[in-house]
Image (cartoon, helix red, strand yellow):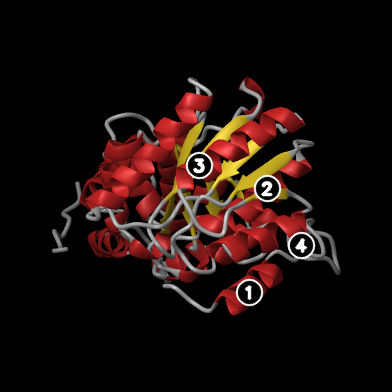
Amino acid sequence: MFSFLKKKTDDGDAQSQSQSAARQAQPLAGASDGAGKEPGWKERLKNGLARTRSQLGGLFSRARIDDELLEELEATLLMADVGIEGTQYLLDELKKRVRQDKLESPAQLQTALTDILAGLLQPLESPLDLDAHKPFVIMLAGINGAGKTTSIGKLARHFQAQGKSVLLAAGDTFRAAAREQLMAWGERNDVAVIAQESGDPAAVVFDAINAARARGIDVVLADTAGRLPTQLHLMEEIAKIKRVIQKVDATAPHEVLLVLDANIGQNALAQLQAFDKALGVTGLIVTKLDGTAKGGVIAAIARQQPTGKPLALRYIGVGEGIEDLQPFAAREFASALFETNH
């Protein structure tokens, strides 16, 4: 029915980083959509996806559905890092919907695309069950700059809001300011931090889990040093941390979260594959969606599943505020991306 074009497609000063973390840890003044208050999560999500959504431009404001519109939509999805497989899937499903439902207007196409994307992303929506173990041990991994330590601070506040007690393990003993940054988050959240000025990161996490047991803590969040997937000796070190955790509790870690920076786009797939091989990743956090036009990478992850199994996208981040990291909801994300009301 339609023809489609095939397009080719560090370390910083400890004090300044600690102060930056303290500033980021300040809670937002409000979290509702009420007048005179800070925007609620749905509005912040919509605002955070503005760069990705802006690529759609006036596609859905045209007078009719034609080949030119669909070809531009294909190019736009590719530029948003939806990937070749993800883009082809969305377009194929869209063609079926146009034929079956006899869609005529771009507005109808927009609604249909939102539905299709939400369906594609639905398998990634899987909230954590923190009541399954006590303490519930969460290990975070990722490359330098992905936002691990900041995500830990935000998760601590999120879990506290659920009535859970939290303990932080400063397992990043490599980066100069990592311990100070995590301790700043701990101070802001009134959460204990187990840390050493130097030493074996596995020993820090080991001590943290034992401390959590002794204190009756609900959740342990273990930070780890950033590393590239190509740094095999460092990947082995992080695997050692996991083995040490299992010596304390054979069922732990109960969650291995890989933190991905949305700015890296398609490179996220390679990172996921490498970290999964070393650690057995169980869930993802995608950060910095507000700073990129590559938010479509979430669709690429959903379609390609480089780990060979449905992988939960636990949380997404759209800003620096402490409330700007929230559980992923497929329909909510798709509606915000394509600016629909359902």
Question: What's the residue type where badge 4 is placed?
Answer: Pro
Contact, CB < 8 Å: mark 3 with mark 1? no
Q: Earlier in the sequence, mark 1 or mark 4?
A: 1
Q: Quadrant of residue 90?
A: top left
CA gap, disc 1 and disc 2:
17 Å
How many neighbours does mark 4 have within 10 angstroms: few (below 14), some (14-19), or many (20 or more)? some
Give the residue displayed 66% in from the left and 75% down from the top.
19
The foreground one among 20 and 32 is 20
Residue linked to disc 4 = 27
Q: Is residue 84 left or right of residue 122?
A: left
Question: What's the residue type where badge 1 is placed?
Answer: Ser
Residue linked to disc 1 = 20
How many neighbours does mark 2 have within 10 angstroms: few (below 14), some (14-19), or many (20 or more)? many
Q: Is residue 150 above or below residue 17?
A: above
The foreground one among 178 and 133 is 178
Give SS at disc 3.
helix
CA gap, disc 1 and disc 4:
14 Å
Q: Nearer the viewer, mark 3 or mark 2?
A: 3
Q: Is residue 85 above or below residue 59?
A: above
Q: Please indicate, yes or no, whether residue 135 appears anywhere in the rendered image.
A: yes
Instruction: Tell me residue 255's x, y (percent).
Output: 50, 33
Number of the label disc, if any, that sits on residue 156 = 2
Q: Nearer the viewer, mark 3 or mark 4?
A: 3
Instruction: Tell me residue 221's x, y (percent).
Output: 59, 43
Residue linked to disc 3 = 203
Q: Please indicate, yes or no, whether residue 341 appears anywhere in the rendered image.
A: no
